[in-house]
């Protein structure tokens, strides 16, 4: 169903009027493939992407996509089928992604480092008939048997995207030496290089009736309950997000190179770092794997105009020896999302950028997989401490009493709800969770209930606080861990922190802080006393942590978010052990 900008502003009291928040844009109703085809026709001689030193023009990129679509048709992939992509940021992945869309099939994106059990779940849950992966990961896939939903596993190698000499060096002298040899005798195994070289002259050109509003991509998310679910996203979700970011950013398109380090199984990486560049004809530098040092070296070497990442990525940049004397004046757009960016960390990064000749600052955004990626961006010329910016064109925000449609006043915390063309179609084969996430309000509009706590100021700036499930109730008071963490992270001796609630018979939960100290700070009782005194001075009494645990590093998820659940599990295990003793 087409998205419609629903009501005039005077009938939408939750709609704010900072800049162009209320501006309506008529987005092209193209599929993902049609978008790239149009860009390739307009800029055939421009480079579409760079990969490990190899550069490919748009005219070659679209030719590869068209050819691989025929290869998939040869394997009997048709409109409506689900095809799983389990790959890092590499040419084969993006070629397959757009070829799948050309056919009218659905691309299911998963983390290439998923364990065997996870891969088996994704394959079964998503009803994929074909999977595409690299040789280094294919042994994690289930065996293809008559009972298995998969018919084929297409196995590629990093060398398939490299010139002969580079491929030879990679395969025989670098990481390729460790890659398992593909057993071609196994049922259903198809080698990428064999497939793309095979004769497709007799294959009929794909003719898809997919519209821009149909299911096109599946991204997995914990959603509102923590259970892994497939969010079904449309081409319009991608188009409106990419072009909305271009419109609100006011800088995207001025430069020529986007560094794509965020993974493509994540909405941030797939849309903001890959599809957005291909939508406007700039070059995407594909980074399949990175370390803080390798990424910093790439920035110096490639001099990108745009980078996007999670907060930890920027923390690594500040510390990297490769950037200490770097000239970062090339950067026009620096975008951060995927996790909370503490105010103190942002101030450090902005100072670092200014000290290195960069004329812009880190611009935050807020979103979730259910709306693909960011739906807010910090404006080009104004930032407010703690804010993730203002809604993009055609995007409406409403802050409500959790699990209701009752709007709360400005500057009051509540559940963040979003109405936008970026909102998903629903969760795959999960109508109950879809109904919980997508709700029709009394205004007649369907809103995405994000399960996130935040607020909105009178000018339309959004302030994300944290997930509702992270809220800790202690002695009847609601405590938001991220607010306590922000205070702790301001302390000159604290590198980072994570706050959780642990069971307490008297209070229900008590506040525990896990803290990473800065280099040289001693982990002793004096440091604990100092932090306690600091918290008592700066935090409401009921929210002051009662326990302080020092830790070498905070656990991270596969997309580098702080894994507070891992700390909760650690605390639960400690409690079980103490009770057994």
Image (cartoon, rainbow, N blue to C red):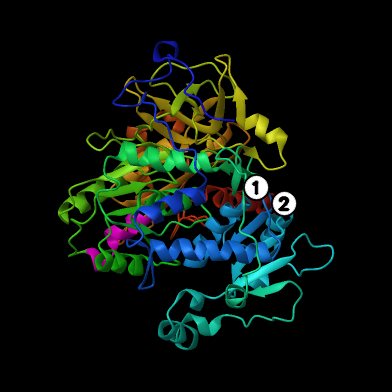
Q: In this view, does 80 lie above or below 88?
A: above
Q: Is residue 90 visible?
A: no
Tell me, for residue 268, which label it has, or none: none
Locate residue 294, reporting x and y percent: 35, 69
Residue annotated with mark 1: 228
Mark positioned earlier in the residue sequence (1 or 2): 2
Magenta: main secondary structure: helix
Q: Image point 73% across, 67% down: which residue?
A: 142
Locate residue 189, reporting x and y percent: 70, 74
Return the residue nearer the eye: 33 or 231: 33
SS for callout 2: helix
SS for callout 1: loop
Most distant residue in the bottom direction: 172
Return the residue nearer the eye: 392 or 337: 392
Q: Quadrant of residue 153?
A: bottom right
Most distant residue in the top direction: 10
Q: Is residue 294 above or below residue 230?
A: below
Return the residue nearer the eye: 137 or 40: 40
544 left or right, relative to 186:
left
Span shown in magenta:
312-323
Q: Is residue 78 above or below residue 176?
A: above
Tell whether label 2 touches label 1 (CB within 8 Å).
Answer: yes
Q: Image point 34% across, 47% down: which residue?
A: 335
Residue annotated with mark 2: 125
How busy is the neighbourhood of tag 1: few (under 14 within 10 Å), some, or many (20 plus)?
Answer: some
């Amino acid at each position: 169903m087409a998205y419609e900008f629903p009501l005039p502003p005077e009938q939408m009291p939750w709609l704010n009027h900072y800049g162009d928040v209320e501006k309506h844009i008529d987005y092209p109703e193209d599929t993902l493939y049609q978008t790239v085809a149009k860009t390739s026709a307009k800029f055939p001689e421009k480079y579409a992407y760079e990969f490990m030193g190899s550069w490919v023009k748009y005219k070659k990129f679209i030719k590869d996509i068209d050819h691989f679509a025929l290869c998939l048709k040869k394997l009997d992939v048709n409109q409506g089928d689900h095809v799983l992509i389990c790959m890092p940021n590499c040419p084969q992945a993006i070629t397959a992604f757009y070829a799948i869309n050309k056919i009218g099939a659905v691309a299911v994106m998963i983390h290439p480092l998923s364990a065997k059990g996870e891969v088996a779940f994704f394959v079964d849950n998503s009803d994929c008939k074909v999977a595409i992966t690299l040789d280094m990961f294919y042994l994690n896939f289930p065996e293809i048997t008559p009972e298995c939903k998969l018919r084929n596993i297409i196995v590629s190698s990093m060398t398939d995207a490299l010139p002969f000499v580079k491929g030879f060096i990679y395969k025989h002298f670098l990481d390729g030496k460790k890659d398992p040899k593909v057993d071609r005798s196994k049922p259903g195994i198809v080698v990428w290089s064999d497939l793309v070289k095979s004769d497709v002259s007799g294959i009929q050109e794909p003719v898809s009736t997919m519209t821009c509003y149909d299911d096109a991509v599946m991204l997995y998310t914990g959603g509102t309950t923590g259970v892994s679910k497939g969010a079904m996203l449309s081409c319009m979700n991608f188009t409106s997000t990419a072009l909305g970011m271009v419109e609100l950013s006011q800088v995207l398109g001025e430069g020529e190179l986007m560094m794509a380090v965020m993974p493509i199984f994540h909405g941030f990486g797939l849309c903001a770092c890959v599809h957005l560049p291909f939508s406007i004809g700039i070059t995407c530098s594909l980074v399949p794997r990175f370390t803080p040092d390798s990424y910093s070296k790439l920035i110096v070497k490639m001099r990108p105009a745009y980078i996007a990442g999670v907060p930890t990525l920027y923390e690594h940049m500040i510390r990297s020896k490769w950037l200490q004397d770097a000239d970062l004046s090339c950067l026009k757009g620096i975008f951060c999302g995927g996790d909370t960016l503490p105010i103190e960390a942002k101030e450090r990064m902005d100072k670092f950028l200014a000290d290195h000749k960069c004329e812009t600052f880190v611009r935050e955004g807020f979103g979730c997989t259910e709306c693909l990626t960011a739906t807010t961006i910090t404006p080009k010329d104004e930032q407010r401490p703690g804010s993730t910016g203002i809604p993009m064109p055609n995007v409406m925000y409403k802050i409500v009493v959790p699990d209701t449609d009752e709007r709360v006043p400005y500057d009051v915390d509540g559940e963040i709800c979003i109405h936008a063309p970026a909102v998903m179609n629903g969760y795959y084969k999960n109508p109950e969770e879809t109904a919980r996430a997508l709700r029709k309000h009394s205004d007649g509009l369907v809103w995405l209930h994000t399960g996130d706590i935040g607020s909105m100021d009178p000018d339309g700036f959004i302030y994300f606080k944290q997930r509702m499930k992270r809220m800790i109730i202690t002695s009847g008071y609601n405590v938001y861990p991220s607010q306590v963490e922000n205070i702790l992270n301001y302390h000159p001796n604290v590198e980072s922190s994570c706050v959780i609630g642990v069971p307490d018979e008297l209070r229900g939960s008590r506040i525990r802080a896990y803290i990473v100290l800065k280099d040289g700070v001693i982990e002793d009782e004096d440091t604990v006393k100092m932090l306690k005194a600091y918290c008592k001075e700066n935090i409401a009494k009921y929210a002051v942590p009662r326990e302080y645990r020092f830790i070498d590093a905070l656990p991270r998820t596969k997309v580098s978010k702080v894994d507070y659940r891992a700390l909760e599990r650690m605390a639960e295990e400690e409690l079980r052990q103490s009770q057994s003793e």
